[in-house]
Structures are given as C-alpha cells and as structure tokens.
Image (cartoon, grey):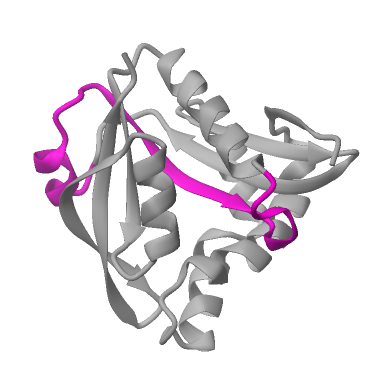
Amino acid sequence: MTHTIRKATADDAGRLAELAAVTFPLACPPGSSREDIAAHLASTLRERHFRGYLADPAVTVLVIDADGDLRGYSLLVDRPASDPDVASALSALPSVELSKCYVHPDHHGLGAAAELMLASLESAAGTGAAGMWVGVNSENAQAIRFYEKSGFRKVGTKSFQLGSTVEHDFVMERGLG
C-alpha cells in the first residue's frame, strides 16, 4: 500500500465521517448495541463534526491517505483535560489528548497504525507538550496492547458515554521527551 500521512483539510470532512462509521464500532465493547454506536456516531462523528474539529485551532487531524482514499486518522486535542478524573491522573503536563486513532480494518496488521501513532506523537511533541494521553475502553484488549507497545501506561480511569450506556475507559499516558 502506497500512502502518506498528512494533516487533514476541510475537504476531508466527509471522507473522515465515512471512515469513522467503519472504524469507531471496532473500538466498542462486544456488547455495545447498534443503537448506542449509531447515537455516538450521530452526536460526534458526522461530517459537520469533522468540519468543526478541522476549524478548531486546538485540534489536529492527521490522515493516512492511500492514493486519495483515507485509510486511517488520528485526532489530537491540544488543551487541558476537562474531565476531572483525567486531569488528576496525568503527570506529563502540558499534555495533548489522542482523542481518536483509527485505521480501516483492511489495513490492520500492515504497520499503518504504528506509522500514524509515530506521526501523532511527533505532532504532539511539536506543540511543546510534555505528554500525550488517550482514553481506551477497558475491554478493548487489542487497543490496550497497541498503546502499551507505543509507550503508554495506565494511569487512571474515566467514564465514557456511549449512547445510553456508560462505558469504562483506562486513561493511558506517555511522555514525549
């Protein structure tokens, strides 16, 4: 697969929403209802939401662009954590949140996720941040292993609203120095 990792533009918003509809459900616990997943997609991952993220100066969206086809993305938020459980768990401050990091399932196992993670870490370090954090569902063993392999460690827990269900996430953090 020939691809590049680049900053997303407003022209990518629709394709990002399509990619999110494929990748977000993969990160959900096995017992998640289709209704809860659909509600989350509708409330945070539609084209208009991506347009808002892309217009926000505190947000960076990186994409894996495979000859014009988006195959993965990460969304970094460069502002202090607003969740008190997260804020109290972090030690590498200031910290950038890795809010989203997804690769299309057709590209799993090809090294694309590791490349996207490296680009995300470099982007966060470029802001002057001392650390990066991510919330990952406590039942998502594959993602937890990936983040641990990428240098993150569990430092706390937080709740995550998925539609009508409250899920439990690990807060994972790593330094950028």
Q: Quadrant of residue 48 in the image?
A: bottom right
Q: Is residue 109 left or right of residue 165?
A: right
Q: Which residue is drawn at 74% across and 49% down?
A: 71
Query: Looking at this view, is 29 or 42 the one in front?
Result: 29
Query: Looking at this view, is 11 or 118 the one in front?
Result: 118
Up the image or down, 79 lies above or below 135; here it is above
The N terminus lies in quadrant:
top right
Residue range highlighted in magenta: 82-110
Decide whether residue 98 is among the magenta residues: yes
Q: Quadrant of residue 6 in the image?
A: top right
Q: Residue at x 76, y 42 (%)?
A: 12
Query: Looking at this view, is 104 or 79 the one in front?
Result: 104
Up the image or down, 139 lies above or below 147; here it is below
Up the image or down, 27 lies above or below 76; here it is below
Q: Which residue is drawn at 31% across and 38% down?
A: 152
Spot occupied by residue 99 in the image (x, y as percentages of width and height):
43, 45
Spot occupied by residue 59 in the image (x, y as percentages of width and height):
49, 32
Q: Residue at x 34, y 34 (%)?
A: 151
